[in-house]
Image: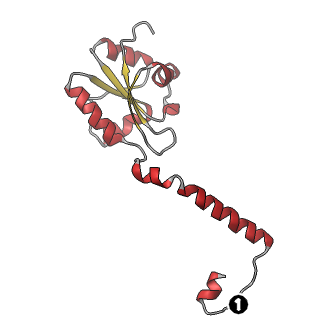
Amino acid sequence: LLADLLTGRWRVTLPSAASAVTVALALLLAAGSVVALPKNYRVPKQDFDGAVRFLETAESAGARIASAGPACWPLERYYGKKGTWPCLTTMDDLRMLTAAAPRTLVVITLTDYIVDAPLREYLRGTCPVARVFPGTLGGGDMVVCDAPKTEGL
């Protein structure tokens, strides 16, 4: 219809019932997505910058910083933390780190992708949350937990 109007062919035809339903559904989906737009423009997909600023401040106050799972790669590659903020891969890694530090903060995101099940479950459900940096990516909030000494786990 719009193409006919734009090309000067003022022929107006009524759409079929199936076309009308398709257009109505497309408009409904588009209208529904408008609800998410304000958050998508206000909150980043993942707030690594906010988390790194918070962690660097904590580190300067004496905390030991680590990451786990999908948080490791961006912190190592984009923020230059390889070698300074270890990437935890097992619960034993966390135990060793917390035993040697007065305070340990661990940053995580997308916890479904942490391979070691005991580490994943501890970080996801037991480790006390110190701060959350919301993101629009599903499950992509940057979560910083304040890991106490874990010798007994």
Residue at 44 percent across and 31 percent down: it is: 69
Q: Amino acid at mark 1?
A: Arg
| Image point (46%, 49%), residue name | 39
Here the colouring is secondary structure
Residue 67's x, y, as percent?
37, 29
Query: How many numbered discs, if any?
Result: 1
The residue most toward the top is 152
Residue sitting at the far left: 60
Q: Residue at x 43, y 36 (%)?
A: 70
Q: Looking at the rendering, in which quadrant would you find the N terminus? A: bottom right
Image: 48 above or below 68: below
User: 106 or 15: nearer the eye?
Assistant: 15
Q: Secondary structure at mark 1?
A: loop
**Is 138 placed above or below 129 here?**
below
Q: Position of residue 77 (x, y in %)?
A: 32, 41
Return the x and y of residue 14 as percentages of the image width and height: 76, 80
Mark 1 burial class by Cα count in 10 Å: few <14, some 14-19, many 20+ = few
Q: Is residue 16 left or right of residue 122?
A: right
Position of 35 compared to 55: left or right?
A: right
Which image quadrant for residue 31? bottom right
Which residue: 28% across, 33% down? 54
Residue 80 appears left or right of 71: left
The answer to whether one can see residue 81 in this image is no
Measured along the vertical axis of the image, is residue 64 above or below residue 73? above
Q: Which residue is mark 1?
A: 11
The answer to whether 33 is drawn above or below residue 92 in the figure is below
Give the quarter of the image for residue 151. top left
